[in-house]
Amino acid sequence: MKTVCAKNSCVGCMACVEICPVQAVSVHEDVQAYNAVIDEEKCIHCNACFRKCQNNHAPQFFTPLVWKQGWVNNQEMRKASTSGGIASALIEQFLAEGGVVCSCAFKNGVFGFSFAEKGEELPAFKGSKYVKSNPLGVYKKIEHYLKEKRNVLFIGLPCQVGGLQTFLPAALQQTLTCVDLICHGTPAPKTLELFLSQQQKSLNDLNDVAFRNSHSYNVSAKGLKPLKGETDKYSLGFLSGLFFTENCYACKYAQTNRVGDITLGDSWGSSLEKQEQRKGVSLIACNTERGKELLSRCDLTLLDVDLESALEHNGQLNHPSQKPKNREKFFALIAKGKSFDRAVFLCLPKKCLKQKLKRVAFALGIKK
Ligand SMILES: Cc1cc2nc3c(=O)[nH]c(=O)nc-3n(C[C@H](O)[C@H](O)[C@H](O)COP(=O)(O)OP(=O)(O)OC[C@H]3O[C@@H](n4cnc5c(N)ncnc54)[C@H](O)[C@@H]3O)c2cc1C
């Protein structure tokens, strides 16, 4: 099997698939790893896929100019978002100024990317989708908008921002603004499918899916049994880094220097009152003047942040997630036919028992 980059290191940005003039590249999406595979019978050896692969280049990183914590002043927008709602504020401002926005949305069972020129797409963008999304099809469209001198805002995972920047000629990036999310890793959508299949559901059955409100993590969707007082096994495995795809454990973007004009994450380690934190507080890095200017035009509350504490509480700003020793056991259990929940239980017994206790405390009314 000939691959575009080193085996099992593909991030799934899809730039190689999009650039190939003869459709010879396809990304094999396994639960454990992605691989961009070249069909040697179709390949014309133009090397375009190698040139556009971010794993074959050093990305351009910016040292943040300023770090802040904060939230959008529109409280409804803040409530509907995962963290402080800064992403929605940036999108709304960008659209109001006549720009085009491209970001991740869940549609027809796929975590893909959509374009918006008007406010109606905003609800689909809201919320973190804790799964590897798929930007296939957006690169050439963004290139087209940039050639027309339109302002484009792209919000995505750092490896997707890196993919876009590697794909586009530097000269075209003058009107492109990128926002990267702090990311501790992503499971393949197939892993989420395994979790859903326990309830005889598939992503294709769902109209919408949420992973978190500002303070609690759970996969929720119409048609799924809601869990009360505890975190479900998908979210528990996600938070523990149990089943990310292989590339995430060697992520070159997990550092303080960033690829986007703006970086967004959670203000973990904040000394703000708990009540404020429960409403959602974002950590924000302005990495370029362009990013700083866009933020200054939005209606936000921005406060100073203790950077040392933020870096201490957000490991992804220092190093990639560590591969847990039970990761292989998890996939082996799944391969042997164990249910998703059982496999997570056997790999993370202490964390699962703690959730059981939380469930009991909730049922007894001891915990809300
Ligand atoms: C997989 C993943 C892992 C994360 N890990 C961390 C972490 O370890 N530490 C931390 O501080 N923050 C992490 N975040 C970021 C955090 O969850 C919030 O998304 C971020 O703080 C912005 O919040 P918000 O309220 O401004 O916007 P939100 O309402 O959360 O919207 C975020 C924006 O990101 C886009 N988006 C959502 N999911 C995806 C996805 N899967 N792929 C591409 N784009 C997406 C949305 O379309 C939207 O434009 C992670 C996010 C994701 C998606």
Image (cartoon, helix red, strand yellow):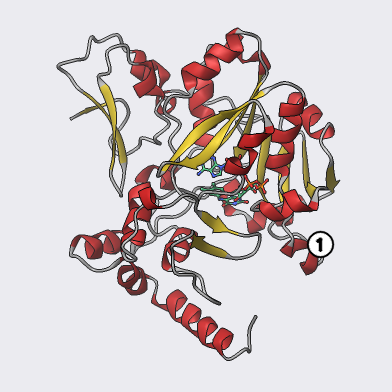
Q: Is residue 64 visible?
A: no
Marker count (numbered): 1
Q: Residue at x 66, y 14 (%)?
A: 150
Question: Horizontally, is 65 left or right of 53 in the view?
Answer: right
Q: Residue 317 in the image: x percent, y percent?
A: 60, 47
Helix, strand or loop at label 1? It is loop
Q: Quadrant of the C terminus?
A: bottom right
Question: Horizontally, is 207 left or right of 274 in the view?
Answer: left
Corner quadrant of residue 25: top left
In the displayed structure, 71 sits above or below 368; it is above
Q: Residue 293 in the image: x percent, y percent?
A: 81, 27
| Viewer-side residue, 72 vs 30 | 72
Q: Is mark 1 within 8 Å of ligand 1?
A: no
Q: Residue 42 in the image: x percent, y percent?
A: 19, 15
Q: Residue at x 39, y 71 (%)?
A: 348
| Viewer-side residue, 197 vs 306 | 197
Q: Residue at x 60, y 13 (%)?
A: 146
Q: What is the crowding at mark 1: few (fewer than 14 residues within 10 Å), some, or many (at least 20)?
A: few
Corner quadrant of residue 276: bottom right
Residue carrying label 1: 272
Amino acid type of the residue tagged 1 in the rendering: Leu
Q: Residue at x 85, y 49 (%)?
A: 303
| Viewer-side residue, 94 vs 84 | 94
In the displayed structure, 171 sits above or below 228; it is above
Q: Quadrant of the N terminus?
A: top left
In the displayed structure, 227 sits above or below 353; it is above
| Viewer-side residue, 124 vs 18 | 124
Q: In the orientation shown, which residue stands out farthest toward the bottom?
A: 364
Question: Horizontally, is 61 left or right of 218 in the view?
Answer: right
Q: Is residue 244 visible?
A: yes
